[in-house]
Image: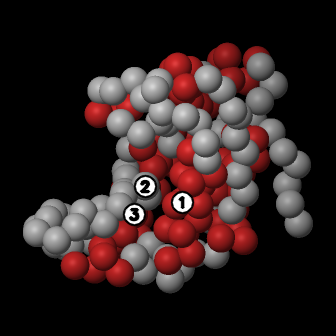
Amino acid sequence: MPAGARKGGFGLDIPAGAVLYNRLAEHAESIQAARNLSVEDFACRYLVVDDIWIPLGESLLIEMFSPIWNHLVDGFGNHDPGKGRYQQQRAPWDVLHPGRNWADRLQPHPKSEKELLKAIEAYLAKGSRECERRPSNKSAGHPPYLPSTQTKAPRAFRRISRTFTHDEPRP
């Protein structure tokens, strides 16, 4: 997404340059800062398109897959709010994946790690039931993109990832 585009600017006058690379590098830094994640456990796939198509593609993917990070665990892409703005509350991402130094200066999130994990389990269970009722999903031959509640978290995330990418499981 071009700089300024999320605030109403089209960003069409900004050269593409290394925008995608910089965004991915920022995401990698957030993962590396987390004390309970390893960047080696992540993979990235992307599609380069003209800037005008980015909001549409992003909106469609969010609507189609309802990713947890767009509904419950926001804050992954947050930046240091800066001096004088640390009265803001910590994002769920930083509660579940502590490690970004600046996030420790923010006010506590009202939900604990345990409460957030329980909400994630409920969200995944709800999505799994909805997916089973969605006939187009089965008729298309795709596996449900949300696992059952019996699936352990690491395995669940691998299943979700495989569904998004249609890749074969990694050993």
**Number of numbered markers:** 3
Residue 90 lies left or right of residue 83; in this view the side is right
Q: Identify the residue at horizontal 30%, vertical 26% (top origin).
A: 8
Between disc 1 and disc 3, the foreground one is: 1
Between disc 2 and disc 3, the foreground one is: 2
User: What residue is pinned by disc 1?
Assistant: 27
User: What residue is pinned by disc 3?
Assistant: 93
Mark 1 or mark 3: name the one nearer the start of the chain.
1
- Residue 24 locus on image (x, y percent): 60, 54
Rendered position, 122 above or below 101: above
Of residues 147 and 159, the one nearer the viewer is 159
Disc 3 residue type (three-letter): Trp
User: What residue is pinned by disc 2?
Assistant: 77
- Residue 86 locus on image (x, y percent): 16, 70
Rendered position, 139 above or below 1: above
Q: Identify the residue at horizontal 64%, vertical 75% (top origin).
A: 38
- Residue 114 locus on image (x, y percent): 35, 72
Rendered position, 133 above or below 170: above
Disc 1 secondary structure class: helix
Q: Based on the displayed image, in which of its 4 quarters is residue 83 positioned?
A: bottom left
Q: Disc 1 to disc 3, how far (Cα)?
A: 12 Å
Q: Identify the residue at horizontal 50%, vertical 77% (top origin).
A: 33
Q: Based on the displayed image, in which of its 4 quarters is residue 143 positioned?
A: top right
